Amino acid sequence: MTAYDNGMIQVDGIPINDSDSGYDEAEGWLGAAENVALVLNEFRRQVKAAR
């Protein structure tokens, strides 16, 4: 995940918000946080299943 000063958020090099569409910067940060939480939860689930 890459977060830029202008509020642009990229996950795996793919922008999840677009500065040309008049996005709300908070939406980008919240979307990125949601993606991080999903990845962490999936990692925890896989570790638990591997035990």
Image (tube, helix red, strand yellow):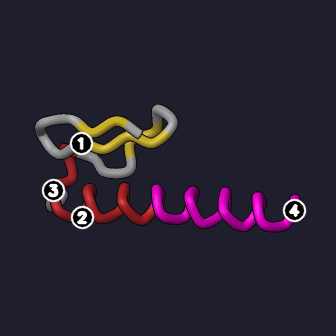
Image check: 25 left or right of 32?
A: left
Where is mark 4, residue-wise? Answer: 51
* Cα–Cα span, label 1 and label 3: 7 Å
- First along the sequence among labels 1 and 3: 1
Q: Are marks 2 and 3 in contact (CB under 8 Å)?
A: yes
Type of amino acid under label 4 = Arg
Contact, mark 1 vs mark 4 (Cβ under 8 Å): no
Let me know if residue 48 is in the magenta part. Answer: yes
Residue under label 1, please give it.
8
Q: Please tell me whether residue 25 belongs to the stretch shown in magenta.
A: no
SS type, badge 2 = helix
The residue tagged 2 is 27
Q: Position of residue 38 (x, y in %)?
A: 54, 64
Image coordinates of residue 42 in percent, x first then y, are: 66, 62
Residue at 46 percent of width and 38 percent of height = 14
Q: Left or right: where does residue 4 sit relative to residue 6?
A: right
Mark seen at residue 41: none
Marks 2 and 3 sit apart, C-alpha to C-alpha, by 5 Å
Which image quadrant: the C terminus? Answer: bottom right
Q: Would you identify the image quadrant in which residue 3 lies?
A: top left
Q: Is residue 2 left or right of residue 42?
A: left
- Expressed as whole percent of the image width and height from the top left, the position of residue 47 reads 76, 58
Tell me the magenta residue range.
Answer: 35-51
Which numbered tag is attached to residue 25?
Answer: 3
Q: Is residue 10 above or below residue 25?
A: above
Provide residue 37's location: percent of width, then percent of height.
48, 63
Q: Is residue 3 left or right of residue 42?
A: left
